[in-house]
Amino acid sequence: MKRLLLVLVICIIFAGVPSILLAQTITAPSVTTGAATSILRTTATLSASITNTGGATVTTRGVQYGLTQTGTWDSHETGAFNASAYSRAVTGLTPQTTYWFRGYATNSKGTTYGSWVSFATKEYPSILTIAASSVAGTSARLNSGLASDGNDDCTITFGWGLTSASAVGAYDSYQVVSGTYSGGDYPYLGVTSLLPGHTYYFRAMATNDIGTNVGLELTFETPMTLSAPTNFLGNPKATSITLVWSKGAGSTNTLVRYSQTDYPNWNLDGVFVYLGTGNTFTLTDLTSGKTYYFSAWGEDGNEYSSDFATFIMTTSAASATDIPDMDVPPQPSRWFTTDYTAMSGMGFIYDGINAAVDVGRIPRATAWFWLAIILAFLAGLFGYLLLGHKLLIAMICLTVVLALEYFARQVPFWLPLMTLILVIAFSTTHKEVSQP
């Protein structure tokens, strides 16, 4: 009997050994906190991972979260869980607020927590429309300020047009600014192809994952840019000129003035002709055969274009029998002029000399002038040598030849005149020397 009791005790002892050994190897699970995803205004998905069950089935897994690193709120689930990743969707959050959370897991041995991780809920962006700058006749810069991005990068869109609109897409034009922007940025957009002298409406819009926010509508006015008229032309008659033109861009009126000496170069220069909204005007009471210089400016609100169009025209003769008082251009002096064509009756000599000087690219008038001088000099020299060194007779011969050439219009008038003066001077000197 004793022997039976001993065997029973030994069996009981050995039966409890595995349970004791198993209990000694179980530990609390290991947990790693993950990231917050799908973050919106009041909801988010918080993730964590059970990296080790601790040797026992995990019966609870979840997350704690709060405004600080304290587990103010809890979201969990119960069951039998192995080592794996899990997530919990939380709701009722406050928009644009920073939260902290951590994962945790529980088994028979206890509960383990992961480290704290923060995330921020999002909100609609807030954007301000700022006054346009660099406004010109056909271009402007539209400005905005992103007061808040709602904890999410934003895209910026501008809308602009000639009529007011409550939505950016309802304007005449709209365009997304390249890139994304954060709170504190000042996105802007340069726009072109605007109409001068018009009022434009515009506003900015910011968009993030939550939605859009539209700034207040502002206006700007493009200044009027004035251009000179184009296609400035005219049709002359004896005492009138009909002017036509195309009105300059941005101009309400066209100003025309004229002068008889040069183009008027500002809007009070010369003689007033026309100021009005038309594109044609007939200027009367002019003098036939006279040249008139016209200038034309674009005008609006007593402002004139910086440039001006010009046009020159001469009035025609009054009739076939009338000789108009034509503007005669200044004529060159006859001091050095000759008329070599006066020798055209000499046939072969005339044509031969002209052909020879043409080869040498010498002006014909110049060649005939020097030919007359050389012939006159040879005549004087011949008279001087042939008549026995009688200087007076030689000079008289030179004078006669030059006089004949003057009447033939081959030398200017001053050559025989100067020679005559020299003859008188030499004759007086010869007389004084000849007297005993």
Image: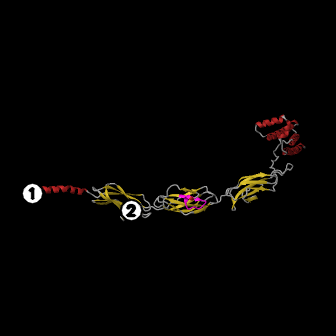
Q: Which residues are magenta?
A: 157-169
Three-letter amino acid code at the position of disc 1 = Lys
In which quadrant of the rendered view does residue 402 lie? top right
Foreground residue among 295 and 395? 295
In which quadrant of the rendered view does residue 196 lie? bottom right
Residue 86 visible in the picture:
yes
151 vs 349: above or below:
below
Q: Verify whether residue 166 appears in magenta.
A: yes
Question: In which quadrant will I find the N terminus?
Answer: bottom left
Q: Verify whether residue 121 appears in magenta.
A: no
Q: Position of residue 388 (x, y in %)?
A: 88, 37
Residue at (10% x, 55% y) in the render: 3
263 vs 72: above or below:
above
Within-10-Å neighbours for mark 2: few <14, some 14–19, many 20+: many
Q: Is residue 36 left or right of residue 128?
A: left
Q: Is residue 100 left or right of residue 270?
A: left
Which residue is at the far right?
A: 436
User: Which is more N-terminal, label 2 or label 1?
Assistant: 1
Three-letter amino acid code at the position of disc 2 = Trp
Mark 2, residue position: 100
Q: Which mark is residue 2?
A: 1
Q: CA distance from mark 1 to mark 2?
A: 67 Å
> Helix or strand or loop: what does disc 1 sit on?
helix
Q: Position of residue 90 (x, y in %)?
A: 39, 61
Question: In which quadrant will I find the C terminus?
Answer: top right
